[in-house]
Amino acid sequence: MTSERSFIRQIRRMAGTLASSAVKTGIGDDCAVLRPKPGFELLVTTDLCIENLHFRRAWHPAQVVGHRCLARGLSDIAAMGGEPLACFLSLGLPANLPQAWANGFLRGLLALARRYKVQLAGGDVSSAPQITADIVVTGQVPHGKAILRSGARPGDRIYVTGSLGASAATLKQHFAGKKIKPEKSNPHFYPTPRLEVGNWLRKHHLATAMIDISDGLSVDLAHICQESGVAAIVSSNKIPIGKNADLELALHGGEDYELLFTASKRAKVPSHIAGVAITQIGEIRNRRDYSSAIQILGDNGRVRALHQRGWEHLKSNAESGAA
Amino acid sequence: MTSERSFIRQIRRMAGTLASSAVKTGIGDDCAVLRPKPGFELLVTTDLCIENLHFRRAWHPAQVVGHRCLARGLSDIAAMGGEPLACFLSLGLPANLPQAWANGFLRGLLALARRYKVQLAGGDVSSAPQITADIVVTGQVPHGKAILRSGARPGDRIYVTGSLGASAATLKQHFAGKKIKPEKSNPHFYPTPRLEVGNWLRKHHLATAMIDISDGLSVDLAHICQESGVAAIVSSNKIPIGKNADLELALHGGEDYELLFTASKRAKVPSHIAGVAITQIGEIRNRRDYSSAIQILGDNGRVRALHQRGWEHLKSNAESGAA
């Protein structure tokens, strides 16, 4: 690795200046200065990525790690119905890390940033015992129009974008010792933040509550239920299952970065938004009528409680040889 | 350590809700929603703190680490002449860390946050091999009024707040094996971000350029010179030297978090602002007239080049037994 100061100069060069009127001052001062549009509120999200916890160098090429790092933050902006403005990167790198890895990471991150016109406007650089990347993404949304987790009401229908479980299926293959090529089309390596869908839903006032599926459907639907004070039921045969996945992975596998949202039963929700399939998977219920916050209707017509198990569960199972 | 989910619930409880009209949605959604005042721009800064690099558990109690972590970010807001709005914390903690350490860290951080009415509005939690804290601080400043590093002009006078070198003096004592009590009055343990001074300078249109002294006077003055395209000369006998420090530590020791600013030679800069001493230490010069960007006038009347050496230098010297 080069010195911190010359690495910062290099990041500044690589980040360049996008034609974004929102960033008045970027890298090179004590703070970045942003100017959101008048009448807009500001969104802020931070996501920490740590080597061997969120990724492994043996499984994830540097560019993939950079892409995934920013995609997590952009997906949070999408889940509020927001437009991304600028991102900030705090990067801790081991002294013996090859410079090519750091460069590849930045290239992956900046390619995704350019696609959504998100300026890298600041951050921090340090050495660290393991690769550590904290990504901060800022966005904007018109006053009072952010789509929160807390707006779901009994009777609302539950929808997801795209399909679920493909990312976890690839993770499972990794744990099983398979070597997987990091294809652009594989959402485990190159997840697509659903910014256009989130924006469309906000502009059309369709979603009553929204979250992105980062921990897994069972966990993220529970977040909506908890913040909204409601219960939910989903139908197992309506869950859109991703490539190489099964129902279990679609329900509990994380890192799909699809959107999970609710809409009034009278709302006309299209079957596709911005080219992405939209599937109705269940319904919001009144909390007090149910012993468990989330239930699932099986193929056999029986209803059972859907327990919250995120991808951490999958991982620890896999590590103990159970998956 | 408790589980991540219950730790997040605990942080949310401890953070509470300050009477801050700027945070519309805090912890508990995909993003925080902030509403800066109309006509204001947004400031964003991030600072990464890693165990054994930025602090040591043997030297720095948990509350001190939490205080220092947020103070770094607030100091960046001060250096722009801004008012802080909200902070965000990405925290990676070892699985075997005592819960009391995490609680102490949060108490130290939140006590400083309350003092400046800064809401902890979000973040991320993960496990990590070493304690890793990335602090994001957002602030606001009226449109076009942020004080940048790039505004210094030949003829401007150079000023610093408070005194320099006391933090590095304590660090040096640490390296020498002394046990130092973490007194509230010791700026190494409890640095005070100079928010009132920064704000006063911005409101009175006095500063042409400003930076906070985090890396050391020699390094941070070089940042102003580089961004402004100017040179500078300082007088060794005018540098205000902190407790237990000497000229060397005042010039090159970091983490003082005082403000370094320039003002027109015709500006009437008071001797104290918000109770903090202000000292004129030198003058901005035209870059092309000098071979070295920064020069220092010694007690002997001789001028020499002032080389940039930050506290990293001090640390590596100390570690090799030279300090």
Image (tube, coloured by chain):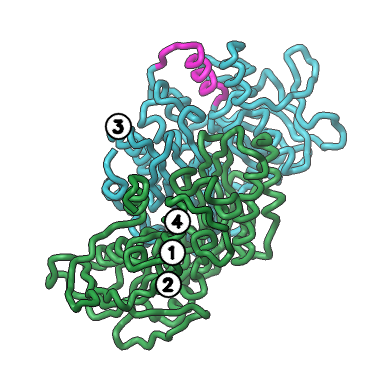
Chain colours: A green, B cyan
Question: In the picture provided, is B140 more to the left or to the right than B57?
Answer: right
Q: Which residue is mark 3?
A: B98
Q: Which residue is mark 1?
A: A256
Quadrant where the image shows the N terminus of chain B: top left
Residue A194: numbered disc: none
Q: Amino acid at mark 4?
A: Gln
Q: Are marks 1 and 2 in contact (CB under 8 Å)?
A: yes
Q: Which residues are magenta?
A: B163-180
Instruction: Determine the secondary structure under disc 3.
Output: loop
Is the residue A236 above or below the residue B157 in the image? below
Identify residue type, mark 1. Asp
Marks 2, 3: nearer the viewer: 2
The three-letter code of the residue at mark 2 reads Ser
**How far apart are labels 2 and 3 at the CA level?**
41 Å
Q: CA distance from mark 1 to mark 2?
A: 8 Å
Work out how far the residue at label 4 is from the one at label 2, CA to CA, in angstroms.
18 Å
